[in-house]
Amino acid sequence: MIETLPVSNAKMHLNRLVRELDRNDGVVVIRNMRTNDCVVLVAAHKWQQELTAMLGQDLHI
């Protein structure tokens, strides 16, 4: 299951989240609980080919 965090928690812990995602090849959803808008953070090095195809441009990681 993919972890979902409120925006306020993600803002407080963004550096830690990035380190953990990179170390664990992880994914997390950050959701604005008021508007239900969300973004997904992924460990890009694991998904580089898929992200490159989806974005239509090379990623320089």
Image: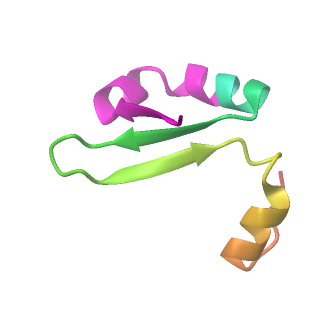
Q: In this view, does 57 lie above or below 7?
A: below
What residue is shown at x 18% (from left), y 51% (from top)? 35
16 magenta-colored = yes
Circle count: 0
Q: Residue at x 73, y 80 (%)?
A: 56
Report x, y in % for residue 1.
53, 34
Q: Examine the structure image and report whether residue 10 is included in the region drawn in magenta.
A: yes
Query: Main SS of the magenta segment?
Result: helix
Residue 29, image x, y percentages: 46, 42
What residue is at 40 percent from the left and 21 percent from the top? 12
Q: Is residue 34 left or right of residue 2?
A: left
Residue at the bottom extreme, as displayed = 56
Residue 39 left/right relative to 44: left
In this view, the residue farthest toward the front is 1
Answer with the quarter of the image where residue 48 lies: bottom right
What is the magenta range? 1-18
x, y percentage for residue 57? 76, 76
The image shows residue 34 at horizontal and vertical percentages of 15, 44
In this rendering, position of residue 19 left or right of residue 16: right
- The quadrant where residue 10 appears: top left
**Residue in the image at 77% along x and 74% along y:** 53
- Which colour assignment does the render follow? rainbow
